[in-house]
């Protein structure tokens, strides 16, 4: 009875506090509206200033506003209209407190966002201006060539330079060094275009348009596209276009006639002197093979200094290097194949295998390095890279995924297979058969030199037999090209205009067919009829393809079927006979039902059904796919907990649970909790994840939308065990939580850097961490270590921590954001400072009862901190890594810190609407204080800044110089 009475009293007290805050908000509505009006005026002024600056810079034609700036300006205009409506409603007596608070929050967010823009505009060429990865220039002749071309570039009378020489001699390497020097010189904009054999004028026009930020997507006519390019070129000057690997004359007029624009220059590389003449190059440079000394120097460097050469080995090595006739690519590739060899007998054997007639044919040198791989799997993986377009940047994870599809790499788990794949690629890079690089998103990638690709295609003219038409422009398939002994066929990123309707190639040995992003609209019914050995069929991203041939159902040897991105495909032929299938990718296709016969795919390891129209799965279908290692479920489907529990081999998972109860049941499975796996899990009734959707190779959990934690049967609230190694946790609008946040979500391990956590709209939470008296959490394995913590709209949150918490809980915290937590009076106790040495960003706003940032009470915080009396009694607090400090709309804030506060790493500070803050505690012992501090934004409230008391007067003088947007 007493317990019930106590709960009733507690509810009454909370309700009373809530209504008092509401009444206070109503009384203060007029004052808050005036404050909001001032803030909107400040925001509008800043937008006007920004717009003027942007427009002035855009007039030059060389600058363009950033998209985020454009979006920000539009949002400010929309907010101004909404404020006008809010103000009009207030004059009619309608006081919408909630809308006022939300608008005030948006104003603050927009002001904060504007500070992060940096430059408001970007140079229309800037996107391409980054140095390219390239080996250093060691050889004397190469250095001379670099200086010769650079001198020509400085000559105003020279506008076009041709660099020619045999394949593999170093033309592209020289051009890359020129590119990088131009980037670093800043006097020229520089655009790099790889032409290669399969180029199209439209493709080159698109690359140039992208570089000058010109939209040609709605223009098909080559001549009009060229005219628009020329107009874009006219708006700037001093630009160098580098055309790499030109095989024949191409029309510069169709590329916007860059040489007709003042200040434009052209550099091209080609194997043919005649091409230089046809292109009208004013001056030409032949890149010749290296002399004996330079060739040996390059070969020796390619071996690596870890390869020790005795005098006898050196004589053999020089003989081998000499047979490369000074060709850099041959020297580098051959040296890579001999790296680490220190046995004289192995060197003599290699020399003996090295044919005498090799000097005149670079492909024999390259083929020799390929033959020395000795490993059939590595050789196949190398040859497989030739299925991609010439000079294509191949993302490593995608490539290894294809190796797995093909069965080229094998392992007991998906992780083992990827590790094996990376090992193979690393070896091919180390042997100089592939080049390490990054793709446009910064992910690890590889690239194949065009000569090495040409050598690979020569090898695959016989056995294995490839037909490669990758990256080639518009074409019609011809049946006579499809010879009977083909092994692999690739039309990767080619444009196929048409497949003849009766075409049915007889290819009984064909194992791989790649029709990736080919613009297909129709595939004839009999097309796959005589491809009975087909094991990999990739039709990905043919977004206009409407229907699949029924004969796919008969491809019984198929290991992998990818229909990814075929959005118009509404149904998939029966898969019941494809019992050998390991990979099925139907991501982003239009199906609304599971393909018929999928329950028979007992060997399936990879299944991606994300972004489909599926609303449910057939009952127990997943239990019939016991070998699944990768599973991404449709967003509308409620993940079947019992079925998932049966998938003991699962390593990567994306899916949605309708509530926390089902998520908890899933996580209670021991094998899911302990194993090292990847996941992107959404919990909630309505799927509303971040815009990126499911992303592989991460560990993220989202709990959104009126979820409740209930044990059922009148039991206590259940704690949810988070998945192993979690990186990201976001909780929104989740009710029924314990008053202590970490008691709801426990994890034995997070990522090595800690948990990035965001919590909003959860009204039961009173503490993030609350350790009962007498409990020791120093070695508590369940205590979550935070990397970043963002807390928004927790109306009953009292504080971050209470009691003696484990020191590691906040010791790795780098970002702390607190917003709209109106019960908080103190941000954190002084004793907790010991654990905040890594804090870099502190942002607190719209907490109407907040009185202190760093509290005066002792005896709270971490176990480590509270045991140190100095941390509790010292008058100096230290946040050594704090860079950004924002305190905004904290009307009751009286103190940042008692005593002194040292934070010498500050870069930015903001103080807005903190009328009761009387003192600035900032203290420094540095001769040059706050060396990184660049800006301080202060509210325009009266003479608040001038009335402040200071711990050190010279700090005030220093800060005064950095004030921004202050009106007194």
Image (spheres, helix red, strand yellow):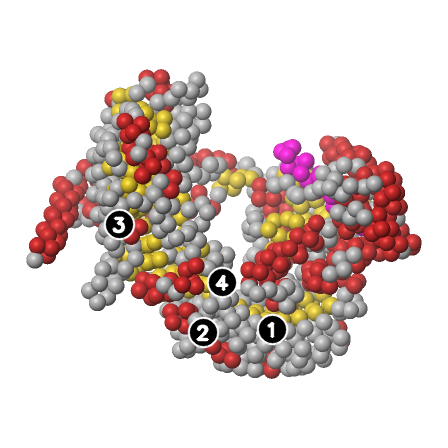
Front residue of 856/125: it is: 856
Q: Earlier in the sequence, mark 4 or mark 1?
A: 1
Which circle marks residue 651 in the picture?
4
Front residue of 215/119: it is: 119
Q: Earlier in the sequence, mark 1 or mark 2?
A: 1
Labels 1 & 2 near each other (Cβ < 8 A): no
Q: Earlier in the sequence, mark 3 or mark 2?
A: 2
**275 on left or right of 99:** right
Question: In whole angstroms, how far apart are the C-alphas of marks 4 and 2?
Answer: 15 Å
Do we see residue 579 in this rendering?
A: yes
Q: Earlier in the sequence, mark 1 or mark 3?
A: 1
Crowding at dot 1, Cα within 10 Å, few <14 / some 14-19 / many 20+, comes out as many
Q: Is residue 849 above or below residue 576?
A: above
The residue where tag 3 is placed is 740
Residue 172 inside the magenta-drawn segment: yes
**In the image, residue 766 lies at what x, y percent?**
23, 47
**537 on left or right of 632:** right
The residue where tag 1 is placed is 559
């Amino acid at each position: 009875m007493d317990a019930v009475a106590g709960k009733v009293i507690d509810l009454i007290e909370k309700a009373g506090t809530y209504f008092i805050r509401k009444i206070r908000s109503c009384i203060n509505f007029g004052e808050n509206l005036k404050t909001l009006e001032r803030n909107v005026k400040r925001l509008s002024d800043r937008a006007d200033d920004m717009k003027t600056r942007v427009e002035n810079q855009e007039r030059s034609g060389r600058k363009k506003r950033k998209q985020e700036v454009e979006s920000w300006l539009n949002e400010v205009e929309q907010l101004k209209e909404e404020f006008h409506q809010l103000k009009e409603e207030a004059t009619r007596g309608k006081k919408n407190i909630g809308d006022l608070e939300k608008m005030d929050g948006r104003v603050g967010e927009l002001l904060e966002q504007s500070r992060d823009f940096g430059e408001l505009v970007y140079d229309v060429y800037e996107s391409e201006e980054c140095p390219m990865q390239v080996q250093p220039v060691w050889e004397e002749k190469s250095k001379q060539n670099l200086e010769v071309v650079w001198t020509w570039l400085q000559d105003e009378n020279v506008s076009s330079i041709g660099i020619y020489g045999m394949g593999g001699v170093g033309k592209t390497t020289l051009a890359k060094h020129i590119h990088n020097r131009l980037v670093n010189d800043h006097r020229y904009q520089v655009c790099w275009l790889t032409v290669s054999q399969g180029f199209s004028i439209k493709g080159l026009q698109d690359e140039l348009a992208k570089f000058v930020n010109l939209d040609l997507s709605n223009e098909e006519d080559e001549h009009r596209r060229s005219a628009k390019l020329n107009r874009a070129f006219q708006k700037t000057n001093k630009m160098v276009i580098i055309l790499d690997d030109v095989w024949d004359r191409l029309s510069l007029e169709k590329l916007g006639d860059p040489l007709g624009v003042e200040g434009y220059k052209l550099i091209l590389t080609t194997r043919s002197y005649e091409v230089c003449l046809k292109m009208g190059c004013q001056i030409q440079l032949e890149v010749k093979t290296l002399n004996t000394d330079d060739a040996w120097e390059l070969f020796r460097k390619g071996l690596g200094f870890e390869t020790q050469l005795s005098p006898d080995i050196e004589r053999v090595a020089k003989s081998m290097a000499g047979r490369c006739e000074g060709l850099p690519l041959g020297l580098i590739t051959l040296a890579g194949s001999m790296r680490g060899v220190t046995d004289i007998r192995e060197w003599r054997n290699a020399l003996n295998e090295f044919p005498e007639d090799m000097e005149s044919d670079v492909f024999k040198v390259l083929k020799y390095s390929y033959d020395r791989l000795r490993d059939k799997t590595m050789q196949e993986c190398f040859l497989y890279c030739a299925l991609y377009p010439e000079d294509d940047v191949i993302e490593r994870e995608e490539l290894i995924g294809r190796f797995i599809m093909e069965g080229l790499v094998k392992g007991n788990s998906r992780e083992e297979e990827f590790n094996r794949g990376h090992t193979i690629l690393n070896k091919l890079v180390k042997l100089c058969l592939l080049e390490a690089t990054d793709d446009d998103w910064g992910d690890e990638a590889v690239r194949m030199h065009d000569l090495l690709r040409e050598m690979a295609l020569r090898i695959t003219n016989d056995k294995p037999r490839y037909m490669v038409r990758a990256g080639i422009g518009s074409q019609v398939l011809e049946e006579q090209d499809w010879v009977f002994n083909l092994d692999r066929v690739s039309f990767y990123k080619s444009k196929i205009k048409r497949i003849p309707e009766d075409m049915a190639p007889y290819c009984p040995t064909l194992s791989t067919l790649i029709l990736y992003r080919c613009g297909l609209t129709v595939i004839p019914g009999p097309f796959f009829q005589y491809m009975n050995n087909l094991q990999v069929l990739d039709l990905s991203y043919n977004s206009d393809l409407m229907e699949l041939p029924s004969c796919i159902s008969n491809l019984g040897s198929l290991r992998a079927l990818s229909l990814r991105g075929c959005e118009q495909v509404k149904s998939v032929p029966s898969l019941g006979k494809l019992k050998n299938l390991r990979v099925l990718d139907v991501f982003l296709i239009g199906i609304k039902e599971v393909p018929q016969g999928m329950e028979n795919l007992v060997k399936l390891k990879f299944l991606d059904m994300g972004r489909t129209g599926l609303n449910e799965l057939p009952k127990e279908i997943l239990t019939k796919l016991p070998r699944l290692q990768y599973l991404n479920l449709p967003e509308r489907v409620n993940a079947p907990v019992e079925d998932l529990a049966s998938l003991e081999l699962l390593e990567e998972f994306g899916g949605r649970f309708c509530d926390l109860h089902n998520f908890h049941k899933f996580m209670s499975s021991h094998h899911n909790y302990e194993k090292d796996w990847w996941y992107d899990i959404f919990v909630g009734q309505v799927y509303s994840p971040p815009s990126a959707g499911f992303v592989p190779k991460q560990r993220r959990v989202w709990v959104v939308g009126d979820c409740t934690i209930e044990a059922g049967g009148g039991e206590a609230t259940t704690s949810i065990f988070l998945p192993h190694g979690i990186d990201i946790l976001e909780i929104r609008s989740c009710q029924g939580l314990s008053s202590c946040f970490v008691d709801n979500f426990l994890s034995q391990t997070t990522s090595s850097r800690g948990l990035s956590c965001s919590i909003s709209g959860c009204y039961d939470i009173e503490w993030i961490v609350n350790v009962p008296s007498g409990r020791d959490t120093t070695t508590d394995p369940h205590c979550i270590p935070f990397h970043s913590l963002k807390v928004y709209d927790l109306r009953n949150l009292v504080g971050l921590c209470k009691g003696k918490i484990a020191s590691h809980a906040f010791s790795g915290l780098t970002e702390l954001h607190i917003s709209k937590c109106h019960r908080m009076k103190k941000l954190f106790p002084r004793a907790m400072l010991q654990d905040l040495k890594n804090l870099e960003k502190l942002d607190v706003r719209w907490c109407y009862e907040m009185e202190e940032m760093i509290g005066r009470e002792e005896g709270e915080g971490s176990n480590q901190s509270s045991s140190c009396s100095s941390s509790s009694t010292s008058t100096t607090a230290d946040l050594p890594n704090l860079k950004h400090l924002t305190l905004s709309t904290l009307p009751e804030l009286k103190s940042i810190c008692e005593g002194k506060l040292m934070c010498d790493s500050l870069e930015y500070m903001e103080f807005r609407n903190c009328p009761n803050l009387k003192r600035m505690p900032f203290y420094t012992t540095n001769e040059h204080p706050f060396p990184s501090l660049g800006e301080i934004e202060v509210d325009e409230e009266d003479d608040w800044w001038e009335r402040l008391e200071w711990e050190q007067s010279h700090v005030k003088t220093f800060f005064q110089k950095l004030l921004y947007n202050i009106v007194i």
